[in-house]
Amino acid sequence: MTQISRRKFSTLAGSLAGGLLVSGMPLAMGRTRAVQEGKKLGVALVGLGSYSTYQLAPALQQTEHCHLAGIVTGTPAKAEKWMREYGIGREHVYSYESFDKIASDDAIDIVYVVLPNSMHAEFSIRAAEAGKHVICEKPMALSVAECDAIIAACKKAGVKLGIGYRLHSEPYTREVKRLVREKTFGEVRFVSADAAYISRGNPDQWRLNRALSGGGALMNMGVYAIQSCIYGSGKNPVSVSAQEFSTRPGYFKQTDETITAQFTFPGGAVGQMMTSHNASANRLFASCDQGWFELQPANNYGPLSGRSSEGPISFPHESQQKLQMDDFARHILEGTPNRAPGEMGRRDMVIVEAIYKSIREGGRTVPIELPEGYGFGG
Ligand code: NAD
């Protein structure tokens, strides 16, 4: 086993066994040595920017089912620092050019793509083709077409795909989903979500560059507001009407500054969202037949805070990224539900494209065609 690559082993084993079940799971691509031996899965972070540095790497020191095993970076000085800090061997360090060699690195089970949005599709697909499970940061990609390509590549390679939607693993969001699912306050009639912060940084940063980001506030914080409207109502929207506001065009030269949107949901509920790079907001509110609930803050790294018409909603705080990566590792190891599957990222991009279309068409109501429950994670 150590003499041949995991990919070759999987293919060989797959053809020999012809679908043989091991531990209740089919022998297939994506069953790395660590998976078979029940060990902690090795994660390679691709892109060592602020999210990897200050959130994901520290969280990977706390995870129970996975650990930091490799890095992919374009900056040799960062590689040296990370190797020292986290005890990563040089043989598990890759550049963007040498990345594909990761295919024969048995220590790496999961590739986590933490790059500017325009690079998500390329590196998620290359990771799948290397036979690695993939976590792709939000927003999943620049278009629905790119999301389709990522999902197809993961399917073809037989690897799991998760989106970096950390909130689906943390208790406040899970409680909101429970309240909606169990109709604790009856039917949701109205949901409102805001996700926004004020951007005053370097005007040359990639988030303000359309080619690299694919859009502004909507592609950044906007996906959280879309998500809140969906899990706050328990349904995918069937239509959207949207508006864009610009007050600092000299700074936001290429990307949207503030967007508002109104949704309709099957069964008659309505919703609204606001996202901005020029205001601060972080809230989810839902009004139901027999009460209401609210999270504020609703989407930062926590601690989150909540209340309802019945009283406070309160849970102990844990690293959301730790919970998220452990959930994904358990999905691979034990077959537990995928909290944020690729289809969820794709669904959100369908809605992002509908919002931009509505804005281009002067706020016209644009239909959204998504199957009921499509993209809902476990
Ligand atoms: P960042 O700017 O801090 O880091 C980006 C990294 O990509 C850097 O290491 C940079 O060197 C590298 N890079 C490679 N090619 C580049 C290029 N052409 N231009 C610019 N940088 C390049 O960004 P970040 O905040 O770490 O965000 C990375 C991804 O993670 C984004 O997709 C973002 O949406 C996502 N993110 C998610 C969360 C979350 O809560 N899930 C939070 C922050 C960021």
Image (cartoon, helix red, strand yellow):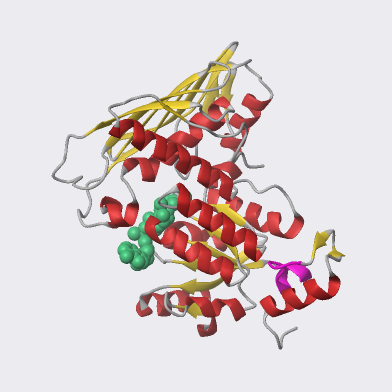
Q: Residue furthest top?
A: 290
Q: Is residue 125 above or below residue 274?
A: below
Q: Is residue 180 above or below residue 205?
A: above
The residue that appears at 46% across and 80% down in the rendered structure is 98
The residue that appears at 33% across and 41% down in the rendered structure is 217
Q: Is residue 215 above or below residue 132?
A: above
Q: Position of residue 340 (x, y in %)?
A: 59, 46
Residue 25 shows in this picture: yes
| Side of 263 where 259 appears, left or right | left
Viewer-closest of 171 and 196: 196
Range shown magenta? 28-39
Q: Position of residue 176 (x, y in %)?
A: 59, 30
Please check the rendered image and state whether residue 347 is part of the magenta-colored stretch, yes or no: no
Q: Report how many numbered discs are placed on residues in the image.
A: 0
The residue that appears at 32% across and 46% down in the rendered structure is 215
Viewer-closest of 360 and 9: 360
Viewer-closest of 347 and 90: 347
For the N terminus, give its image quadrant. Answer: bottom right
Viewer-closest of 127 and 170: 127
Please check the rendered image and state whether residue 36 is part of the magenta-colored stretch, yes or no: yes
Q: Position of residue 248 (x, y in %)?
A: 16, 39
Query: Where is residue 186, by image quadrant?
Result: top right
Q: Residue furthest left?
A: 250
The residue that appears at 42% across and 49% down in the rendered structure is 143
Q: Quadrant of ligand 1?
A: bottom left
Residue 140 shows in this picture: no
